[in-house]
């Protein structure tokens, strides 16, 4: 259990804010950047290609994850990186006024992405050090909810603010988005200041000792090699890479689909409306699904809920087939469809998170979990790269039908992995 100065600190005092801080830079770099570049007139093909490559830091982070154990405590890493990411986002807000904004902001997003990926290593390791196995399961819904709460603040609040400022400045997109990203930077810096006092000091959060710097690469090699020698590694990797094959393509196109005019096959929503539908009501539904998923798994375990969660994450994607064909004008209907899909995703994604926690238990849990999240990022990067080109080739209607076809591997790979029936269930 977590402790501070020898006394136990409730997970509610730090888990929500820690995962809110983990989510803010991720959603801005990976998700809000899509809307940003769409509003700046970048094509869907270039948006999908450029923003998918931003997954690379999360994909390769296992290779430097041992440094988090070797250099400093995870608490020090968390605080340092939160401050650095806040400053990085502040520079993004300034760079949006440059004529070469696309290149400069991509470089800055890459730097923030590397800091964010390293922060994830420290935060996830801190989570596993501070909680026992049952609490890790019980609070997975809480961490996922507040992680998604960052999506409300980013994909909802920041996007809505940018849309409102676009109206305020009569279409001055650079000024509107610069101010919006400035607010996001100040938000992350504020969380950093809060964490300087709020984060506990678990007794087990210590830097590794007795290892020379020359041994770091050997340590990395040995840890990674041990992971890949485990039993059933092929099916494990298949699950990590293919479970979200459809989502990896869908997430890059949803915002452009909602923003594009109806004559181009989109829904013709404003920036503010996208912030409300996808970034607020959608994310709230996502959070509720995540909370329900965590609660359900803590009662009966991952194995019992695996297939309901598999169905929940994939089947609701069909709402985009309906939206692209019917192009409803009712904002209420659009919100309902988005909320349904996001609720199912939140509930179903719990299975993915718990699977990673399950196979990360044991020695070097931080590194194992980092390897898992690296493959998770790869599973989002590779399918996302061509998604914009596929959409522009097929059109929105046929693209969303392709998305439903892409869910098939997500139904196959869960049958290939072994789930510990005891994992996640409260000990009697």
Image (cartoon, rainbow, N blue to C red):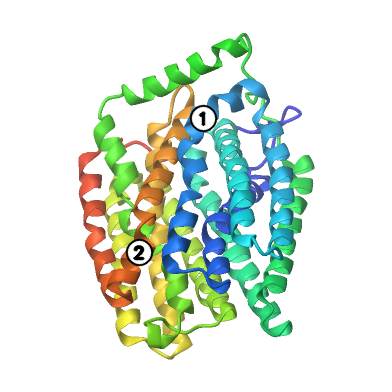
Left or right: residue 351 compared with residue 214:
left
Which of the two labelled residues, at mark 1 and mark 2, occupies the earlier sequence position? Answer: 1
- Residue under the image location 50 percent in, 72 percent down: 278
- Which of 143 and 222 lies nearest the eye of the viewer? 222
Image height check: is 10 above or below 188? above
Element marked by disc 2: helix
Q: Which mark is residue 366?
A: 1
Tell me which corner region of the image, top left, top right, bottom left or bottom right, holds residue 69. Answer: top right
Q: Which mark is residue 389?
A: 2
Q: Rate crowding at label 2 as few (under 14), some (14 to 19) or many (20 or more) other CA atoms within 10 Å.
A: some
Residue 256 place in picture, x, y as percent: 46, 72
Residues at circles 1 and 2 in contact by the CB criterion of under 8 Å: no
- Which of 187 and 382 lies nearest the eye of the viewer? 382
Can see residue 285? yes
Element marked by disc 1: helix
Left or right: residue 297 compared with residue 115:
left
- Residue under the image location 38 percent in, 20 percent down: 225
Residue 362 place in picture, x, y as percent: 44, 24
Residue 347 place in picture, x, y as percent: 40, 58
């Amino acid at each position: 259990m977590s402790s501070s100065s020898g006394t136990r600190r409730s997970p509610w005092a730090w888990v929500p804010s820690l995962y809110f801080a983990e989510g803010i830079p991720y959603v801005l770099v990976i998700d809000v950047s899509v809307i940003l570049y769409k509003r700046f007139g970048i094509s869907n093909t270039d948006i999908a290609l450029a923003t998918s490559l931003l997954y690379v830091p999360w994909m390769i982070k296992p290779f430097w994850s041992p440094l988090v154990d070797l250099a400093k405590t995870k608490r020090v890493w968390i605080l340092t990186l939160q401050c650095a990411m806040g400053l990085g986002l502040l520079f993004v807000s300034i760079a949006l006024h440059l004529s070469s904004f696309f290149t400069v902001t991509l470089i800055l997003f890459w730097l923030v992405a590397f800091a964010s990926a390293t922060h994830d290593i420290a935060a996830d390791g801190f989570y596993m050090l501070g909680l026992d196995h049952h609490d890790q399961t019980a609070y997975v819904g809480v961490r996922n909810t507040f992680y998604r709460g960052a999506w409300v603040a980013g994909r909802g609040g920041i996007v809505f603010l940018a849309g409102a400022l676009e109206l305020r400045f009569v279409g001055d997109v650079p000024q509107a988005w610069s101010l919006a990203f400035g607010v996001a930077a100040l938000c992350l810096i504020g969380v950093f200041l809060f964490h300087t006092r709020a984060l506990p000091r678990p007794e087990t959060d210590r830097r590794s000792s007795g290892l020379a710097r020359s041994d770091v690469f050997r340590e990395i090699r040995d840890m990674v090699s041990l992971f890949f020698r485990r039993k059933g590694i092929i099916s494990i990797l298949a699950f990590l890479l293919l479970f979200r094959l459809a989502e990896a393509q869908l997430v890059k196109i949803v915002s452009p689909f909602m923003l594009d005019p109806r004559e181009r096959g989109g829904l013709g929503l404003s920036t503010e409306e996208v912030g409300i539908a996808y970034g607020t009501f959608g994310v709230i539904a996502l959070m509720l699904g995540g909370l329900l998923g965590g609660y359900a798994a803590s009662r009966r375990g991952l194995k019992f809920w695996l297939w309901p969660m598999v169905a929940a994450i994939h089947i609701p994607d069909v709402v985009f087939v309906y939206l692209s064909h019917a192009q409803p004008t009712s904002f209420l209907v659009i919100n309902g469809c988005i909320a349904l899909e996001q609720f199912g995703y939140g509930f179903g994604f719990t299975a993915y998170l718990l699977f990673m926690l399950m196979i990360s238990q044991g020695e070097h849990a931080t590194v194992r979990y980092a390897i898992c999240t690296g493959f998770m990022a790869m599973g989002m990067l590779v399918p996302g790269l061509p998604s914009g080109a596929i959409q522009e080739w097929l059109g929105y209607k046929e693209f969303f039908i392709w998305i439903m076809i892409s869910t098939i591997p997500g139904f196959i790979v869960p049958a290939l992995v072994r789930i510990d029936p005891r994992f996640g269930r409260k000990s009697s």
